[in-house]
Image: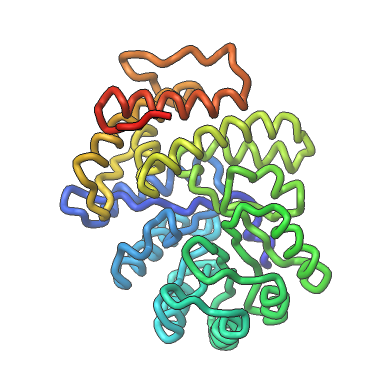
Amino acid sequence: MSSELAGIFTPTLVPLDDRGEINEQELARFLNWLIEKGVHGLYPNGSTGEFTRFTAEERRRIVRITCEVARGRVPVLAGAAEANIKETLAACEAYAGFGARAVALVSPFYYRLGPEALYAYFAEIARNSPIDITLYNIPMFASPIDVPTIRRLAEFPRVIGIKDSSGDVAFMMRMIAAVRPIRPDFVFLTGWEAVLVPMLVAGCTGGTNASSNAVPELIRRMYDLTRAGQIEEAMKIQYRVLELFDTMLYPFEFPDGFRAAAEMRGFRMGRGRQPLSAAQQADRTALQRVLRCILSDFGLVEPPPEGCAPRTTITSQDKIAQVVYEVLNELEKRGVLWNKP
């Protein structure tokens, strides 16, 4: 049943050792922790998992380890996006064999494709895949999938849902309105936790949210409150998660901010595979202090030794402006910001 994909799925980070290789032991420890903290499912090989920076063999290894750790406790939605149909179908077959519940497929990258080409691509996979498919709409990185195309693809039994990372609530509503009348069990997942509560209220089934790598209990709590109809309480958390999400996303090279936050929760994430310049390394050091202050405000980590700015007398909206100020101030003090607005 596609309903197994409801709730919060973590697009999992991949810990690396000092040689830049997959740290399998730490990955297993991290995945177990996520499950214990209450996420509904695991999503290896997503954008947050930096799937394009791993080889095909490594991507298979990541999914195999994830399925072995999950052991049926939670479903695994495995990213299976490869460069062409043949390799994508090979990944689908492998992940089905590992025990994944479904795969997530992004539009072909590099070439920009129109609606008919996208339909033909996904339809060919849907006819031949041995495992259920969720579409993955991420227009900032790949050809966008429009609503009429999603509606057509929903006619294939193997296509059971879509993950949308546009953050566009109106687009999500249009998809739901077009598809749910013909496929009541179709899964709608949002990949943009900055609007998770509004998306759930609009009819979303759940989310694949990068922030759940760092604060899984908060993302799960936000989901539970919304489902219980306690929207006001859910929105209080939503504003605080928005602050954290913006700090992890925008000042860092993606997904370094999420890796840094997961490290603060006690995991050895190691350096990512994307090299950083000296200036970026200095930025990261400065930004980590701000990130630690926000996490300590949630009561999840200890504050930095030098302390944090007082945060008790400002509103949720004001906190976002304060985060921006703190980030800019830290960068200026370290000489890596030359034009403070």
Does residue 288 sit above or below 249 in this rendering? Answer: above
Residue occupying image coordinates x 50% and y 43%: 212
Residue 29 visible in the displayed image: no
Q: Name the residue nearer the viewer: 151 or 2.
A: 151
Residue occupying image coordinates x 78% and y 69%: 178
The residue furthest right is 181
Q: Name the residue nearer the viewer: 156 or 68.
A: 156
Residue occupying image coordinates x 62% and y 27%: 317
Does residue 67 sit above or below 36 in this rendering? Answer: below
The quadrant of the picture occupied by the N terminus is bottom right
Does residue 205 sit above or below 124 in this rendering? Answer: above
Quarter assignment of residue 126: bottom right
The quadrant of the picture occupied by the C terminus is top left
From the top left corner, tell me how far across and down residue 21 is, in percent: 22, 56
Q: Name the residue nearer the viewer: 13 or 197.
A: 197
Quarter assignment of residue 29: top left
From the top left corner, tell me how far across and down residue 336 is, in percent: 27, 33
